[in-house]
Each structure stands twice: as C-alpha cells, then as structure tokens.
Image (cartoon, rainbow, N blue to C red):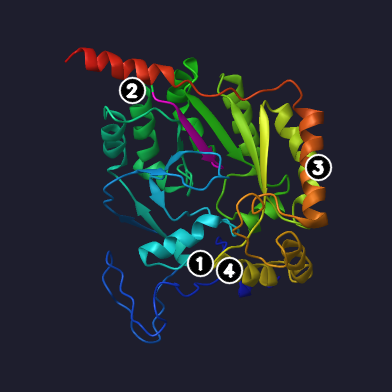
C-alpha cells in the first residue's frame, strides 16, 4: 500500500454519489456556509459536528432478523470510519454521501434525552428494551464532547427502563457509575464489537476506533462490575478476519464475556463501491480473493437483502464460518448465559404514577 494514495485516519477513501440525487444537481449543505469554488479543496479531513432537530428519537425496528425491537441513535454518521459499516447508507437520507461524508459530517441530536423521556413516560408506551447504537455508535468520539449518551442513561435509570448498548469504544467506561446502578436491577446489557486481535487489521478496517487491548480491557471491567457483556464478532470477512474466530472467542470469554454473536459481511448499496475501492488501495494483494469470497456467501453478489440468509450467508465459506461459531460457543461459552433484561420495574413505575391521578 502506498501511504500517499490513501487518506490517513479514514476508512472510506472517496465520496460516492448520493442515490437520492441526480448527479447533475448542485447539492448545498443546509448547515454550513456554501463555499465551494471550482478547483478549491472543500474538505481538509476535519470532522464537522452539525446539530439536527428530529421529532422522535426511538425507532421501531421492522426487520425480522435484527434481534431488537426498538433502537435509538444520538448521532448520525460515525467518525470511527469502519469501512464495512451498514449504517453508511443511512447518511444518504440526510443528503450526504455514504463515503467520507459519513465519517466527517456527524449529525448531533442534543434533544435526544428529552425526546426519550417524553416517550417512556407515555401511558401508551409498552416497555421494551431500547438499543442504543442500532445504527451508529453512541460512544463515538463526538460523545466525549456532547455527553448525550450519558444523559440518556440517566433517563433510563430514573425511570427504571431497560437499555442495551452496542459499542466498540472504551469511552463507555466513563459511565461505569450509571451502568453499575442499572446493572443492580438487570436493566443493562452491553455488546462490545471486536473484529480482530490484530492491530494492523484494526487500523485499516476501523481506523478511529479503540485499540483491541482497550476493548478487551473494557469487556473485563464491565464484567467484573456485574454488567453482562456480549461480544459481537461482526462482521466476519472472509480472508481478513475469518481465521480469527476461535482465538477471538477464547480471549473474550477469558475476559468475562457471557456470549458471542456474529454476522457475515454484506456490502449493500453504496458500501459495495466504497469497500471495493478501499480494499484495492489497502490490500491489493488479496482484494480480488476477498471480494469473490464475499460474493460466494451471498449468491454471487456483494449485496444481500434476503431476510434469514443475509446475516449468515450461504455456500461453503459461510457454512465454515457458521460452524466455527458453533464450535466457539461449545468450547468457550458452555454454561454462560446472557439473561433477558428486566421489564417489570418500569411497568411498576408507570402503575405507581397512574395511581397518583
């Protein structure tokens, strides 16, 4: 790889066209002063934080194979820059590119705690665990500045409402005090994403994420404090991290994880072009092999939207990966269980509030 040919500290190496706009249309940023001039360098690789004002913050998850009913995302876009991230496509709904824009233009929802509180106080709200980071990481670098995730955790604790978190950032340990309080009543479950034991792989695959050592330490500290941890070995990418399944599972179990989950990478929408460009620049020696193996897991395509098969894939390589996961669970997680979160306390809280009237 020629370092001069890549953008340092970023996953995507280009901005792809937004599918919702004609290429001939001029696109203006509603939040920034329009300053583009022909030949001028628009972006110097800085991250821009842009405040937005959604009317709601909790989303109903309609996909039957996701494993969650409700999710919320304090931020849209993610500075972590994971090249494979399925959330990239969602940035197009905001008028941005799924490529570099996804990593450089982070939309900040400062009203998230207020919107969350208004929802779970409703008499009509039926208690379900709400997953923070169903789309983008709630502990990405922006959280250090804005602390929206922490404020939301305070709301969950106040109303004794169950919450799950998905993250790959050790910043979650900043909120250990709140997590421990939630953990006392079985109101919290944490999912830590760890895709490799190799720092070399992490740096190119997930350029602005916490190191592997820090992530393992995070699993250990959370577990030691009574907070249940599931580790997401996701996504598994053939010929990049597929050979690490068993050693990864062993290490995370030794650090206290109660379970593992996985997906096989799929490159839907603009992500296929972004990933293809990235791997040809960063891993040219194996680019074609990896792309062909991904295709072999999804009926000959990089793209796969079929419920039931899109997460686990099909074909020989997918079968080998899924069998390794089964073996890892048998070898390293026998007798370990992630318990379901407590739904009763929030229902009791609502009943108590209703009796006041």
**Residue at point 74%, 69% (across, down):** 287
Q: Are marks 1 and 4 in contact (CB under 8 Å)?
A: yes
**Left of 99 or right of it: where is 160?**
left
**Distance Cα–Cα, label 1 vs label 4:** 6 Å
**Distance Cα–Cα, label 3 vs label 2:** 41 Å
**Left of 320 or right of it: where is 24?**
left
Which element type, helix, strand or loop, lies under badge 1?
loop
Q: Are marks 2 and 1 in contact (CB under 8 Å)?
A: no
As rendered, which of 38 and 98 lies closer to the eye? 98
**Distance Cα–Cα, label 4 vs label 3:** 28 Å
Asked if residue 232 is positioned above or below residue 84 in the image, the reply reads above
Percent position of residue 69, x then y: 47, 38
As rendered, which of 312 and 118 lies closer to the eye? 312
In front: label 2 or label 1: 2
Closer to the chain start, of discs 1 and 4, is 1
> How many C-alpha atoms fall within 10 Å of the one at disc 1: few (<14), some, or many (≥20)?
many
Q: Name the image quarter holding the N terminus.
A: bottom right
> How many C-alpha atoms fall within 10 Å of the one at disc 4: few (<14), some, or many (≥20)?
many
Residue 48 visible, this angle: yes
Percent position of residue 57, x then y: 34, 44
**Distance Cα–Cα, label 2 vs label 4:** 42 Å
Which labelled disc corresponds to residue 168? none
Q: Which residue is mark 2?
A: 159
> How many C-alpha atoms fall within 10 Å of the one at disc 3: few (<14), some, or many (≥20)?
some
Residue 103 visible, this angle: no
Which element type, helix, strand or loop, lies under badge 4?
helix
Closer to the chain start, of discs 2 and 4, is 2
What span is colored magenta in the figure?
A: 161-169
Which labelled disc corresponds to residue 324? 3
Q: Which residue is mark 4?
A: 274
Q: Which residue is mark 1?
A: 99
Which element type, helix, strand or loop, lies under badge 3?
helix
């Amino acid at each position: 790889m020629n370092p001069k040919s890549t953008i340092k500290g970023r996953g995507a190496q280009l901005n792809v066209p937004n599918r919702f706009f004609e290429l001939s249309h001029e696109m203006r940023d509603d939040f920034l002063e329009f300053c583009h001039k022909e030949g001028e360098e628009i972006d110097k690789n800085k991250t821009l934080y842009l405040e937005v004002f959604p009317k709601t913050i909790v989303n109903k998850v309609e996909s039957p194979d996701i494993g969650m009913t409700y999710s919320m995302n304090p931020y849209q876009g993610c500075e972590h820059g994971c090249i494979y991230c399925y959330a990239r496509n969602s940035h197009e709904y905001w008028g941005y590119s799924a490529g570099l824009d996804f990593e450089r233009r982070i939309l900040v929802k400062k009203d998230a705690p207020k919107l969350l509180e208004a929802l779970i106080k409703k008499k009509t709200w039926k208690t379900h665990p709400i997953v923070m980071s169903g789309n983008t990481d709630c502990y990405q670098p922006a959280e250090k500045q804005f602390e929206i995730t922490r404020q939301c955790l305070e709301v969950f604790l106040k109303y004794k409402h169950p919450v799950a978190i998905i993250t790959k950032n050790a910043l979650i340990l900043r909120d250990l005090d709140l997590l421990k309080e939630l953990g006392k009543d079985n109101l919290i479950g944490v999912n830590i994403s760890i895709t490799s034991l190799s720092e070399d792989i992490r740096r190119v695959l997930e350029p602005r994420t916490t190191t592997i050592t820090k992530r393992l330490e995070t699993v250990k500290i959370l577990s030691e404090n009574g907070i249940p941890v599931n580790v997401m070995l996701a996504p598994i990418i053939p010929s990049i991290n597929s050979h690490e399944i068993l050693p990864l599972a062993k290490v995370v179990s030794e650090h206290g994880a109660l379970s593992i989950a996985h997906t096989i990478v799929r490159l839907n929408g603009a992500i296929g072009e972004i990933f293809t460009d990235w791997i040809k620049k960063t891993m040219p020696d194996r680019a074609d092999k990896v792309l062909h193996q991904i295709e072999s897991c999804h009926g000959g395509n990089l793209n796969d939207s079929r419920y039931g098969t899109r997460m686990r894939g099909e074909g020989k390589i997918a079968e080998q990966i899924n069998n390794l996961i089964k073996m890892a669970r048998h070898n390293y997680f026998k007798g370990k269980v992630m318990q379901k979160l407590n739904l009763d306390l929030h229902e009791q809280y609502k009943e108590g509030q209703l009796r006041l009237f």
